[in-house]
Image (tube, rainbow, N blue to C red):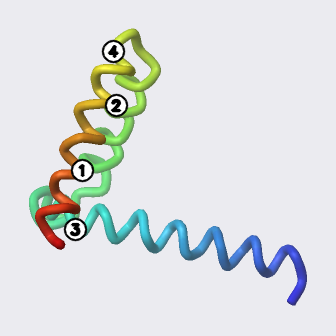
Amino acid sequence: MREWQVKRRERTRQLIELGGLVVKAELVDLTDDDRAMLYGAFLWMANKLRSDERAHAAALWKRRGKRAFDAES
């Protein structure tokens, strides 16, 4: 298999996994599959991560995510 094919498959897998997280968080249902709302929320998160609040927001979100993953186990 060629290098570009391997990279393409890795990228495809990453995108599928990220989409799975959106579904797992029930964001598709909660937004009635409103892509503009989801994109706006992602932009809000990106702005938080670019701001002076980055460390606090990242720590909070990571802690919540880890707890949710642990609760599923």
- Quadrant holding the C terminus: bottom left
Identity of the residue furthest to the top in this view = 52
Q: How many marks?
A: 4
Q: Nearer the viewer, mark 1 or mark 3?
A: 1
Q: Residues within 10 Å of mark 1 (few under 14, many from 20)?
A: few
Q: Are marks 1 and 3 in contact (CB under 8 Å)?
A: no
At label 1, the amino acid type is Gly
Q: Which mark is residue 47?
A: none
Categorize mark 4 by other alpha carbons within 10 Å: few (<14), some (14-19), many (20+): few
> Mark 2 sits on what residue?
58
Which residue lies under the disc numbered 3?
24
Closer to the N terminus: mark 2 or mark 4?
Answer: 4
- Residue 10 location (% of width, % of height): 65, 73
Q: CA distance from mark 1 to mark 2?
A: 10 Å
The mark nearer the N terminus, 4 or 3, is 3
Q: Residue at x 16, y 57 (%)?
A: 68
Q: Earlier in the sequence, mark 2 or mark 3?
A: 3
The secondary structure type at the circle numbered 3 is helix
In front: label 1 or label 4? 1
Q: Amino acid at mark 4?
A: Glu
- Label for residue 53? 4
Q: Is residue 69 above or below residue 36?
A: below
Which residue is tagged 1? 65
Q: Which element is circle 4 on? A: loop
Q: Which amino acid type is shown beneath numbered disc 2?
A: Ala
Distance from the alpha carbon under mark 2 to that under mark 4: 8 Å
Question: Which residue: 15% across, 64% down?
Answer: 26
Percent x, y of residue 8: 72, 74
Q: Residue at x 35, y 46 (%)?
A: 39
